[in-house]
Amino acid sequence: MNGRPGQIHAAVYPGSFDPMTRGHLDVIERAAAVFDKVTVAVVVNPQKSAPLFTLDERERMICEAVAHLENVNVTHFQGLLADFVKRESATVIVKGLRVVSDFESEMSTALMNRSLSGVDTVFLPSDPRWSFVSSTLVKEVYNLGADVSEYVPLAVLHVMQSKRPAPRPA
């Protein structure tokens, strides 16, 4: 990235990550290759109903999945993303886009964040292998008994397996 000499280009990649998918990991790895520092920020969203994973579980799973990336750290925040970005001294927000409708829903948020913080949002298109994978869909098919090992990092799979509901007797 161009900029002032010695300037650190820090990015924030926010999300609920319930659970983190291989699509999320792909975006993190690609952002880590572009920016000096990437903060994966787990959103504490009281409006989302009953997450599958606790905040601590999500942070631990992400930390394990990104352990190979020296310039990535994981934390959480509550409140306005614009405020968090300022506290982190980030220069950009990173968002992954799977499909066109993601762009439509993310664009107004990106413009609001820019208005509030002066920080732009960079959109990274999903790798086509993961364009259909969402956390919601992964949870849904997993709870119906499907093998989701192809769609989530190993650290996530292990925790998911510990939470699978016991099969009901026939």
Image: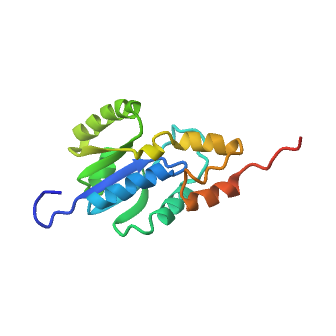
Quadrant showing the N terminus: bottom left
What's the colour scheme?
A: rainbow
Q: Residue furthest left?
A: 4
| 42 relative position to 86: left or right | right
Location of residue 68 by image quarter: bottom left
Q: Is residue 39 left or right of residue 116?
A: right
Quarter holding the C terminus is top right
- Specify whether 58 is left or right of 89: right
Number of marks: 0
Judged from this view, the residue extending furthest toward the right is: 170
Q: Residue at x 70, y 41 (%)?
A: 144
Residue pushed farthest front? 129
Q: Residue at x 69, y 53 (%)?
A: 163
Give residue 147's position: percent from left, percent from top. 66, 49
**Image height of 163 relative to 101, above or below:** below
x%, y% of residue 41? 41, 53
Query: Residue at the spot x=44%, y=51% of the render?
Result: 24
Q: Is residue 14 above or below residue 102?
A: below
Horizontal side, residue 82 vs residue 50: left or right? left
Could you say where residue 27 lies in the image, as x and y percent from the top left?
A: 38, 52
Look at 44% across and 55% down and name the residue there.
Answer: 25
